[in-house]
Image (cartoon, rainbow, N blue to C red):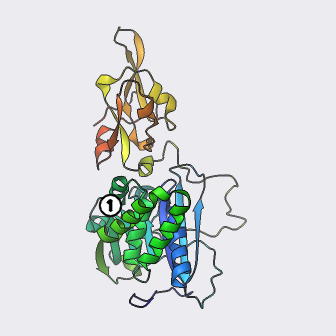
Amino acid sequence: MSGRSPMITNENGFFEVRLESIGGLGANIAGKMLAEAAVLYQGLNGSAFSSYGSEKKGSPVKSFVRLCGADHALRDASPVVSPFVVGIFHEMLIKTEPVTAGLRPSGTAIVNTTESAQAMASKLCRTSGRVAVVDALKIAVEEKTRVNTAMLGAIARLCEFLDPDAIKKVIRETFDHKYPQMVESNLRTFDRGFNEVQILELGPGSEASVCEAPKAGPAFGYLAAPIGGIIPNPGNTVLKDLTASRQGFLPAFLRDKCIDCGQCDLVCPDFCFVWEKGVDKKGQPAQVLLGIDYRYCKGCLKCVVACPTDALVEHREEPGYADAHRVPHDLTGGKPAKSA
């Protein structure tokens, strides 16, 4: 490990990382690859494990990584509640999850976003430590991979005691086993994440400089234990925003080509399509498709495949597109709102 910064540790002798994500973005495997690189190629002790409910794409996922020196025993398997680094795999998670809960004042938040580090620091209420941003989704789309290896590259850049070459070895070994054709593209994705991350230094700060946020992983006793079998934050409800599930593409709706056949609605797993009573081209009463409520669209594009008239087409998502073209469902049973 010569030539790299020494690993900082907490009061228990651990360096801890928490990855905040949703199912489908690859945070679980990213945490495992990070720990494997540290253990197999840097001589550290380490563990990686994840917390999630339903394995449905779009459900919240937390991946925990805990590292320590080879001479220090690692017997702690509890969730990481006070990390030195938080990796946020999609900026929309900031709206629904306490992603920076417990992050140390001197810690680092790394966000997959198109916004600047200064703007993200303001959103996260961070006035100390470091905030880093990387457009991991853009990199993943261009390299035809997922955002996880781009985020790994950014994490390697910010955690200077980690050896990027060690992580790249693990990436190669991981993908070479089942997906050898994906090895080189994921290595490029890692390198781009490493080189394209933008870092904002905010200074040392103090505990009072960080916005209040609930601690992750509260201890439950027999009086406060949740009822078994309940998922407290499911990935798909009328209150859930699935924007973070999209991996660079969404369906664009072309009203002039639509024949209101309903094939899109039949294949949509999340009831994204909004209809109203109207008339068909012959003047007969019919259901007319108004558009898509992108709040519930996770970008699976099944509707694009099913549409017989190309009224739904694959569209590369850019910031603001979904909000500008969204037709919200009216959950009270009234007439749906028109798009902006």
Q: Using the image, determine if residue 25 lies above or below residue 190.
A: above
Name the residue: 47% across, 69% down: 101
The quadrant of the picture occupied by the C terminus is: top left
Name the residue: 26% across, 68% down: 118
Q: Nearer the viewer, residue 239 or 50?
A: 50
Q: SS at mark 1?
A: loop
Q: Using the image, determine if residue 147 lies above or below residue 283.
A: below
Q: Nearer the viewer, residue 182 or 56?
A: 182
Q: Is residue 201 left or right of residue 180?
A: left
Q: Residues within 10 Å of mark 1 (few under 14, many from 20)?
A: many
Q: Position of residue 251 (x, y in %)?
A: 37, 38
Q: Position of residue 215 (x, y in %)?
A: 52, 70
Q: Position of residue 224 (x, y in %)?
A: 67, 63
Q: Position of residue 63 (x, y in %)?
A: 53, 66
Task: Tell me the quarter of the picture where residue 279 sits.
Answer: top left
| Residue 120 shows up from this direction | yes
Q: Is residue 337 left or right of residue 9?
A: left
| Residue 103 shows up from this direction | no
Check disc 1 and report the residue beneath it.
Answer: 135
